[in-house]
Amino acid sequence: MRELLRKRILFFGGKGGVGKTTCASAFALAASREGKRVLLVSTDPAHSTSDIFQKPFDRDEREVYPGLMGIELDANLEARRYVDRAKAEIARMFSHAVAKEAERQIELASAMPGVEEVALFDRMSDLIIDRFDAYDLLIFDTAPTGHTLRLLRMPELVSSWIGALSKRRRALLSLNQDIDKVRQSPEAVDPDDDPILQTLDRRREKLELVSARLMQHNFTGFVLVVIPERLAIEETARAAEILRESNVNVCGVVVNRVLPDDLDRPSTSLGPGPSTLLGADGFYQSRRKQEQIYLDEIKRRFSAYPLTWIPQLETDVYGLENLERVCAGLMR
Amino acid sequence: MRWDELKHNVGDFLHGYFVSEYERKLREQFVDLNDLFMLQCFMELVGLPNPAAIYLLDVYPYFLEEFHTWHRRMGMDRSPIGSMPCC
C-alpha cells in the first residue's frame, strides 16, 4: 500500500463491519508518520474513529495525533447547517415577509428524503475543493458500500440535473427576450443577470469540479476492505464492478482479519462452545480450512487490484497500540 | 377614405395581426417551457424524488411569483405546498 501514499484523495469502503475505519485510521496514521499532512474524514453515520484514536472528533478539523487532523461528519447536522445557511442568505436578500414564507417552504424541503445525503456530500465537496491544498492527503472513511457508491455518483447525477434545469431556464429567458423584440418593449431579464440561472450555474460548476477530482485516477483512489467471508466477498466484488463502471479508480483491496498461520494452538480459555465438540485445535483448523478457500477466491476475483493482507489480531483494534500493528501490516 | 390611406390602414392591420399572432405563439411556447421548468423544480409535488431538491433551496424565493401562476394554471387553486406565500 506504500505507493498509495502518493495519492491526494483516498476513500476506504466496504461492507459494514469489515474494518474500514480501522484500515482508514491506520493508513492515516502511517501517512502522517511519513511526514504528510493528513486529514481523516469519517462519513460513516456510526462514527468510530474517535473510539479508535480515543480522542474526541468534531465536525470541524482537529488534531487527533501529531500531524494528523480528524473530522467526523454527521449528515443530520450538515443538513441543518445547510438549511440554516440557505435561510440566512434568503433573509439577506429578500423582504421580511418573503423570507418568512420561504422559510416554511425550506423547512419542508429539508425534510425530504435524500436531503441529508446531499448535505453530507456538499460538505465533502467543500473539503475536497477548499482543503485540498491545505493537506497532502485527504482520507475518507466511508459508510457501508451502497451508501458510498451513491455518494460518489451524486455529483454526476445532480450536476446533469441542474444542467438540464439551467438549460431550460436559459431557453425560457431567451424566449422572453424574443417576445420583447416583437413588442419592442424591453422588459425581460438578460440571461446573464438572472439570479436563478446564476445560482444554478454556480452549483453546477462546483459539482463538476468535485466530479473531476474524484475521477482523476492519478491522485484519487478507492480502497476496498474485505474479510474472507462469503457475503463480504460478494458485496465487494459488486462494489468494485460498479466503481469501475463509474470510472472511479479502485487502487487496492485490503483483506482484513486473516487468521494467522504461525499461531500456537489457541489457549484453552475459549470456553464452552464449538471447541468442546471439536477440540480447540480442531475448531481452529476447520475455520482455517474454510478461510483458505475464501482467500483463494479473493486472489482470483480481485487479481486486477493490489492486495494487502492484514492478520486477525488477538484483541480487537482499539486504541493506538493496536492500530500501529494494523499500520505495520498495511505498510509492509 | 382615400385609397392610399386605406392601403396604409390595411397594411397596419395585417402587420398587427401577424405580429400579435407571432407573439401569442411565442408566449404559448414560453408558458409550456416554464411549466416544464417548474415541474422539474417542484418534482416533489407529483411524488417524484428531486435529486437537486436541497440545491434548489437558494433559488426558491425567486420562484415565489412564478410558482403562483404555475400552480393556478396547473388547476390547483391553492398553493399545493401550503407554504408558498401566494395563497
Image: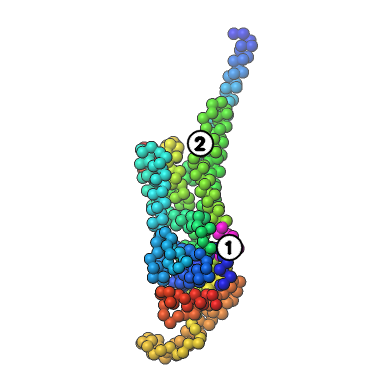
* Dot 2 alpha-carbon crowd within 10 angstroms: few under 14, some 14 to 19, many 20 or more: some
- Taking the spot 45% from the left edge, 75% from the top edge, the residue there is A323
- Rendered position, A183 above or below A219: above
- Taking the spot 56% from the left edge, 26% from the top edge, the residue there is A184
- Rendered position, A297 above or below A284: above
Q: Quadrant of residue B76?
A: top left
Chain at tag 1 = A
- Taking the spot 50% from the left edge, 71% from the top edge, the residue there is A33
Chain at tag 2 = B
- Name the amino acid type tagged 2: Val
Quarter of the picture containing the N terminus of chain A is: bottom right
Q: Position of residue A26 (x, y in %)?
A: 48, 72
- Residue behind mark 1: A219
Q: Secondary structure at mark 1?
A: loop
Residue A135 visible to the viewer? yes
Q: Is residue B16 magenta?
A: no
- Residue behind mark 2: B31
